[in-house]
């Protein structure tokens, strides 16, 4: 059964704005972000998503853990961060449309934190915020069938994947399929779905904006519960995605290094031969001299093989 929601004028407007910004992102060659920006955004994503759940580690402490440095902090918080680092590094290994893959990701994310990590709950649970019960989740015996239905909707419904990612996020939180870790898991899986829509979302720290608007996040989850429809939450999440893309576009003047330009070009060209002009077509913002220097350095580092001379010079990446 299709989850209940309406496609409002606001939703249509936000989808149009997001689509336009993704076009700008492609034009600015930000689909594959520079390595250092990817790393910063990944750390920001992990820190923000876990802070929403009460984790105390700072961006510096998470950076230290990523670099295998010693960090003094509560053991539970360190385990949460290490698990998150591992699961976010494996996004390309998971399959957005498969329930089994989601359970595998939860098993990694919550390893050492809860019993039966990666297994759907079979007991009843309620969500408490402050002193109030915010939500009573469906009974344990309904969790499996509800999740199967939700993934069927994700795979088969004709609505835009961008829209379905937001609906999935709400319905996942409503079902609350695991004993613990549902908040961070719901945000992670929306990233997985959005990554299918555009690769730019793999390193876009949407969670950082959710953290800034944490009270609104919970407010719209509760509002959608009361309304029996995810419409309000979908509008909110589309606003968040739109803001994340706006923030990304502000970085478009960021200067990529020669290593980052070469890495991006390798991903696009693969094992085909190419000329300096081919390289310049992708990197229109650099001069001919800079392009020549990039290619010369890569030949010297044994990243590229060079054949021919002058106008007949061609290059090819060495495949390991």
Image (tube, rainbow, N blue to C red):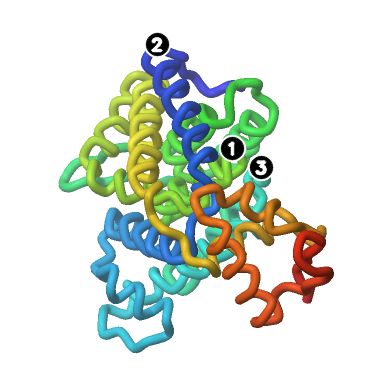
**Residue 284 x/y as whole percent:** 55, 48
Q: Residue at coordinates 53% horizontally, 59% vertically from top-left?
A: 106
Tell which circle, 3 or 1, labels the residue nearer the N-terminal end.
3
Q: Residue at coordinates 62% horizontally, 52% vertically from top-left?
A: 280
Label 1 neighbour load within 10 Å: few <14, some 14-19, many 20+: some
Q: Which mark is residue 197?
A: 1
- Residue 293 picture quarter: bottom right
Label 3 neighbour load within 10 Å: few <14, some 14-19, many 20+: some
Q: CA distance from mark 2 to mark 3?
A: 28 Å
Q: Secondary structure at mark 1?
A: helix
Q: Residue furthest front?
A: 310
Q: Residue at coordinates 49% horizontally, 19% vertically from top-left?
A: 4
Q: Which mark is residue 97?
A: 3
Q: Quadrant of the C terminus?
A: bottom right
Question: In the drawing, does residue 48 fall left or right of residue 306?
Answer: left
Q: Foreground mark, 2 or 3?
A: 2
Q: CA distance from mark 3 to mark 1?
A: 12 Å
Question: In the drawing, does residue 85 fall left or right of residue 93?
Answer: left
* Residue 121 or residue 217, whichever sits in front: 217
**Residue 62 x/y as whole percent:** 34, 73
- State whether residue 316 is above or below residue 299: above
Tell which circle, 2 or 3, labels the residue nearer the N-terminal end.
2
Q: Residue at coordinates 39% horizontally, 70% vertically from top-left?
A: 81
Q: Which mark is residue 9?
A: 2
Q: Quadrant of the N terminus?
A: top right
Q: Which mark is residue 41?
A: none
Question: In the drawing, does residue 23 fall left or right of residue 271?
Answer: left
Q: Residue furthest top?
A: 9
């Amino acid at each position: 059964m299709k989850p209940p929601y309406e496609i409002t004028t606001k939703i249509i407007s936000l989808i149009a704005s997001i689509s336009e910004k993704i076009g700008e992102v492609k034009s600015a060659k930000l689909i594959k972000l520079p390595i250092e920006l990817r790393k910063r955004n990944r750390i920001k994503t992990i820190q923000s998503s876990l802070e929403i759940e009460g984790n105390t580690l700072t961006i510096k402490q998470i950076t230290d853990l990523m670099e295998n440095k010693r960090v003094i902090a509560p053991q539970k918080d360190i385990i949460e961060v290490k698990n998150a680092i591992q699961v976010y590094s494996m996004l390309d290994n998971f399959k957005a449309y498969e329930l089994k893959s989601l359970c595998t990701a939860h098993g990694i994310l919550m390893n050492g934190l809860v019993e039966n990590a990666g297994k759907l709950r079979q007991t009843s649970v309620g969500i408490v915020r402050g002193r109030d019960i915010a939500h009573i989740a469906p009974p344990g015996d309904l969790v499996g069938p509800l999740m199967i239905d939700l993934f069927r909707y994700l795979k088969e419904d004709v609505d835009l994947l961008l829209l379905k990612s937001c609906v999935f996020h709400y319905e996942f939180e409503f079902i609350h399929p695991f004993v613990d870790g549902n908040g961070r898991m719901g945000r992670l899986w929306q990233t997985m779905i959005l990554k299918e829509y555009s690769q730019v979302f793999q390193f876009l720290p949407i969670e950082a904006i959710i953290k800034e608007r944490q009270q609104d996040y919970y407010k719209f989850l509760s509002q959608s519960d009361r309304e029996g429809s995810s419409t309000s939450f979908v509008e909110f999440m589309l606003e968040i995605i739109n803001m994340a893309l706006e923030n990304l576009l502000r970085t478009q003047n960021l200067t990529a290094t020669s290593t980052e330009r070469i890495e991006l070009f390798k991903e696009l060209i693969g094992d085909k031969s190419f000329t300096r002009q081919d390289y310049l077509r992708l990197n229109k913002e650099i001069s001919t001299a800079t392009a020549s220097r990039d290619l010369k350095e890569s030949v010297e580092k044994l990243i590229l093989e060079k054949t021919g001379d002058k106008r007949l010079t061609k290059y090819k990446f060495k495949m390991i």
